[in-house]
Amino acid sequence: MDLEIEAKIKVDSHDAVRARLKELGAVYLGKARETNRILDRKKTLRKAGCGLRVRQIEVLDGDPGSSSITFKGSVQPSDLKVRSEINVAVDDAEAAARIFEALGFEPFITFEKIRESWQLGDCRIELDEVPLLGTFVEIEGPTEQAVKNTKSELGFDAAKTITQSYVRMLRTVAAAEDTVIRF
């Protein structure tokens, strides 16, 4: 099982980060609008600290990746966000979501975000714009040290790392346990 190891940092703007990525020779991968459907069945995944996501990608520029199904395990103790992750590319996210719904999973939150993707060494850098939450930088890499080194290269040594998911942050903003959020 793969591990998701990431640092998430809230920023006022992506402009300085984008300039720093270019200065460091990072490779621009692309930009997409993501529709993220978070599914659960009788709150079993949420109670276990896990998640099931069906992500639909609308490419805006380049090749930022494909639609996918992702299972995320519970968060492990760390100053970064570390959790197990199983990710499978799919051609038809709508059909995948319908399959899960036929199996009794229901969407409890659906949200869109704009994501600009970059590659810097072993790490993938995501510049995210999330409605109601703002702008973020996510640094994901193969090891905690790789993520911490890239965080430092980007000038975020003193920046607070957020370990909450966008889902948890949006649920806090919505302040309603089972509200489906659509943008």
Image: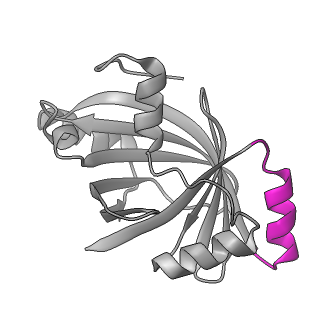
Residue 117 vs residue 51: left or right?
A: right
Q: Quadrant of residue 17?
A: bottom right
In magenta, the rendered stretch is 12-26
Say if the magenta span includes residue 173.
no
Q: Residue at x 44, y 68 (%)?
A: 5
Residue 23 vs residue 111: left or right?
A: right
Residue 143 in percent (x, y) is at: 46, 80
Which residue occupies the foreground of this view, 52 or 168? 168
Prevalent SS, magenta region: helix
Say if the magenta span includes residue 17.
yes
Q: Residue at x 47, y 76 (%)?
A: 144
Which residue occupies the foreground of this view, 101 or 121? 121
In this rendering, is residue 179 above or below 74?
Answer: above
Residue 142 in percent (x, y) is at: 46, 79
Residue 3 in percent (x, y) is at: 35, 71
Residue 23 in percent (x, y) is at: 88, 74
Which residue occupies the foreground of this view, 129 or 36? 129
Q: Quadrant of the N terminus?
A: bottom left
In this rendering, is residue 38 above or below 10?
Answer: above
Q: Quadrant of residue 95?
A: top left
Residue 46 vs residue 67: left or right?
A: left
Q: Residue at x 45, y 51 (%)?
A: 163
Q: Residue at x 29, y 39 (%)?
A: 97
Q: Quadrant of the C terminus?
A: top right
